[in-house]
Each structure stands twice: as C-alpha cells, then as structure tokens.
Amino acid sequence: MILRPLAAQELAAHPGCTHMAIITADDLTTTAVTTAQLLKLCDLVAGDVIIRVEDYLVVPFEVVGTPGTDSLTRSIGDNAGVATWTAATESNVNGTEVLNVFSATAPKLYTAADKVAVNFIPKTGTSTAQVNKGELHVFFGILRVSQLSKGNTQSIISTK
C-alpha cells in the first residue's frame, strides 16, 4: 500500500481531501477463509478532524480465472466501526462492483487516538489472499490542528 499527500492537481480534483492511499491486490494477504482483512491507512491523534472520505475502484478486484463468481466488499471506518465513513460496497468484478463511493458522514473530530482503515470482506469460503488483480484509491482529508497551529506546512501524517 502506498500512502501519500495529494499533489496540487489532485487537491483540485478532490476538494476537501489531503491524502490518498493506493491499495492493490498484493496488499490483500489474509489467508484464513471467510475472514475480513483490515488495512490501516493512518493513525489519528486526539484533535484530528477527518473532513472527507471517498474512494475510486481503478481496477475491480478479482481472482483471475474465476471472474464474476466471487465477492469482495470494502468499507472505510475507524475504531468506532468498520463502516464509519462508507458502507460495505462491492469491489469484485462480478457485474455489481461500485466504482466510486463518497462518504455522507459530516466531518468528525477525534477526541482520542484512532485510525482510518479499509475493511475487505471476502465471499464465504474464500480469502482475501486469493485475490490477484485489482486497485483501489482511497482519498481522505485530515486536519491536524495541533500541527496547523504551529505553522507546520509539512505533511501532517507519516507516509512511511
């Protein structure tokens, strides 16, 4: 997974977003059957505000050789729930995949440490590690007020 601040032209295309994560099939590694996989995008500290969350399914996920027979849902959440920001949405190339998801949740102030994460749920009897094709871009806007008040203009979250 790659996590990085948005470039100037991306900021214009995704108002309210500051960062993006690129998730590919290679990031889906849970081998246990019918087990969800949670991919943490970033840590949050008390005082952070998430302004906006959206995603774009660049390449629908699939198990090559079995197109149209699998299911893999995605949702974006935090410690309060795996779908705090977006509800479970189909990500597999099975004819019902949803390419764009936008959160309808209002900006949220975090009063304690937390995280932003994507939850993937495979079809019963399969695992996320079986997925061998796909790419998802997750865009989110984070305000780290503690850094802004210090005049810090560098990236507000670690992208390592």
Image (cartoon, rainbow, N blue to C red):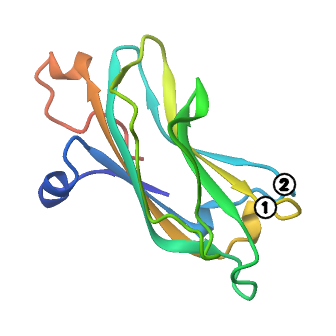
Q: Dots 2 and 1: beta carbons under 8 Å?
A: yes
Residue 111 location, x and y as percent?
Answer: 43, 11
Given the current orientation, which residue lies at the most extreme bottom position?
65
In the image, residue 84 sits, relative to residue 124, either above or below, namely above
Q: Residues within 10 Å of mark 1 (few under 14, many from 20)?
A: some
Q: Considering the numbered disc 1 on the image, is that residue within a helix, a strand or a loop?
A: loop
Identify residue type, mark 2.
Thr
From the image, tell me which residue sits under label 2: 34
Residue at 24% x, 39% y is: 155
* Mark carried by residue 102: none
Q: Considering the numbered disc 2 on the image, is that residue within a helix, a strand or a loop?
A: loop
Residue at 58% x, 23% y is: 80
Which label's residue is closer to the chain start, 2 or 1? Answer: 2
Mark count: 2
From the image, tell me which residue sits under label 1: 123
Separation of disc 2 and disc 1 at Cα?
A: 6 Å
Residue 5 location, x and y as percent?
Answer: 27, 48
Foreground tag (2 vs 1) = 1
Residue 90 location, x and y as percent?
Answer: 60, 61
In the image, residue 12 sits, relative to residue 92, either above or below, namely above
- Picture quadrant of residue 17: top left
Q: Residues within 10 Å of mark 2 (few under 14, many from 20)?
A: some
Observer-nearest of 25 and 59: 59
Residue 149 location, x and y as percent?
Answer: 15, 16
Residue at 87% x, 58% y is: 33
Observer-nearest of 44 and 159: 44
Identify residue type, mark 1.
Lys
Given the current orientation, which residue lies at the most extreme top position?
111
Q: Is residue 118 left or right of residue 69?
A: left
